[in-house]
Image: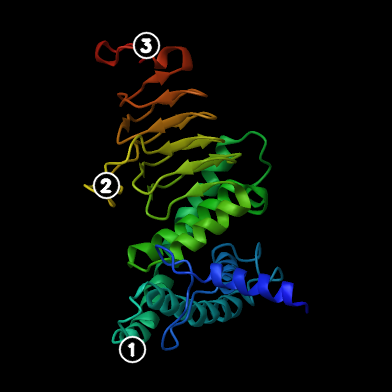
């Protein structure tokens, strides 16, 4: 290796390791582990095999082997989830605080078991999502096709897993799970969003659902829909304030068509239809019919557009 190359490498290493604002280099102290993206991906696929037996994991499941296969999968989920929860808890802990490591080691198995207890509820919700998708899509041939092929169901599955985990105040892990679905499908659902039963995402690419969204039951949205924030209130230093309710509330039986953008803490009343390409920053009453040409000029107070 020439001296010139050595000098360039030394300078590059020095610049890459210079202190920067924020934590851009992870250096685990006292053996604190970091969550494993690869293992979390495998964990999610194992959970998917429990929620949809035979469709994922062991495809030779039958009435004689179902309980055995589920037991084996749940044992695997328990051990791997325990480890990834522990790593996530340790990861968010301040580097100088090492007293909580033992507490995390004790709490992680308890949290993993609490999550496993929620799996039947997650399965029930996903069955409703699949059935609603089948009923609402004339192109679908069967529930099986939807489970295998539809990106909306894949993303919703990751979301429902992550949402249960985030309710236990587990950091980082739920977000990793939803971002995996985001990369695979183009559907970005924050794990903190609250989404009711029989939820349908048709086609799905480009859908964004923010952290403080509240979505009712039997809601259907199409590709490119954004349920986002209109603005971000800031503190005295100009930094966005965390934890503010800034995303829409969508009531029951709403349909939102492709590329609609709905911003801010507004409410879309039940049984409403929001047309494609609508840009909406005001609440609308129940049974509204909002189309692009009317969205900018209508007077909601006199019932126009309803």
Q: Are marks 2 and 1 in contact (CB under 8 Å)?
A: no
Q: Earlier in the sequence, mark 3 or mark 1?
A: 1
The answer to which of marks 2 and 3 sits earlier in the sequence is 2
Q: Earlier in the sequence, mark 2 or mark 1?
A: 1
User: Which residue position is annotated with label 1?
Assistant: 102
Quadrant for residue 232, please give it: top left
Q: Residues within 10 Å of mark 1 (few under 14, many from 20)?
A: few
Q: Which residue is drawn at the image coordinates 60% and 53% (left, top)?
A: 183
The answer for how far apart the CA atoms under marks 2 and 1 are is 33 Å
Tell me the quarter of the image containing the N terminus: bottom right
The residue depicted at 55 percent of the width and 48 percent of the height is 130
In depth, the one of 75 and 27 nearer the eye is: 27
Q: CA distance from mark 2 to mark 3?
A: 29 Å
Around disc 2, counting alpha carbons within 10 Å, would you say few (fewer than 14), some (14 to 19), or many (20 or more)?
A: few
Q: Quadrant of residue 82?
A: bottom left
Q: Secondary structure at mark 3?
A: loop
Name the residue at the left extreme. 236
Residue 57 or residue 210, whichever sits in front: 210
Quarter placement of the C terminus: top left
Image position of 165 with respect to 30: above or below? above
Are dots 2 and 3 in contact, CB under 8 Å? Answer: no
Q: Which residue is mark 2?
A: 244
Q: In the picture provided, is 140 more to the left or to the right than 125?
A: right
Secondary structure at badge 1 equals helix
- The residue shown at (67%, 54%) is 148
Label 3: which residue? 297
Residue at point 43%, 75% (across, down): 85
Determine if residue 187 is in view.
yes
Q: Position of residue 87 (x, y in %)?
A: 44, 78
Across and down, in percent, residue 4 comes to 73, 72
């Amino acid at each position: 290796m020439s001296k010139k190359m050595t000098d360039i490498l030394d300078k590059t290493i020095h610049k890459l390791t210079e202190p920067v604002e924020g934590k851009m280099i992870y250096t685990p102290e006292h053996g604190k582990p970091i969550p494993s993206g690869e293992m979390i991906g495998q964990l999610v696929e194992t959970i998917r095999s429990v929620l949809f037996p035979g469709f994922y994991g062991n495809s030779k499941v039958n009435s004689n082997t179902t309980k055995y296969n589920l037991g084996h999968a749940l044992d695997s989920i328990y051990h791997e989830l325990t480890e990834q929860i522990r790593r996530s808890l340790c990861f968010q802990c301040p580097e100088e605080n090492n007293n909580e490591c033992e507490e995390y080691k004790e709490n992680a198995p308890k949290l993993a078991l609490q999550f496993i207890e929620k799996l039947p509820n997650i399965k029930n919700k996903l069955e409703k999502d699949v059935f609603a998708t089948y009923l609402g899509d004339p192109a679908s041939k069967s529930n099986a096709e939807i489970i295998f092929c539809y990106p909306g169901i894949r993303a919703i599955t990751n979301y429902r897993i992550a949402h249960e985990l985030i309710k236990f105040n587990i950091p980082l892990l739920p977000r990793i799970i939803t971002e995996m679905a985001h990369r695979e499908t183009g559907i970005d659902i924050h794990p903190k969003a609250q989404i009711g039963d029989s939820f349908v995402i048709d086609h799905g690419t480009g859908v964004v659902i923010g952290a403080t969204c509240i979505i009712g039951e039997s809601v259907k949205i199409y590709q490119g829909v954004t349920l986002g924030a209109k603005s971000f209130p800031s503190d005295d230093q100009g930094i966005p304030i965390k934890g503010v309710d800034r995303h829409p509330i969508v009531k029951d039986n709403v349909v939102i068509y492709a590329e609609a953008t709905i911003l801010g803490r507004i409410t879309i009343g039940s049984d409403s239809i929001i047309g494609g390409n609508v840009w909406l920053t005001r609440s609308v009453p129940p049974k509204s019919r909002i189309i692009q040409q009317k969205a900018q000029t209508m007077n909601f107070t006199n019932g126009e557009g309803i």
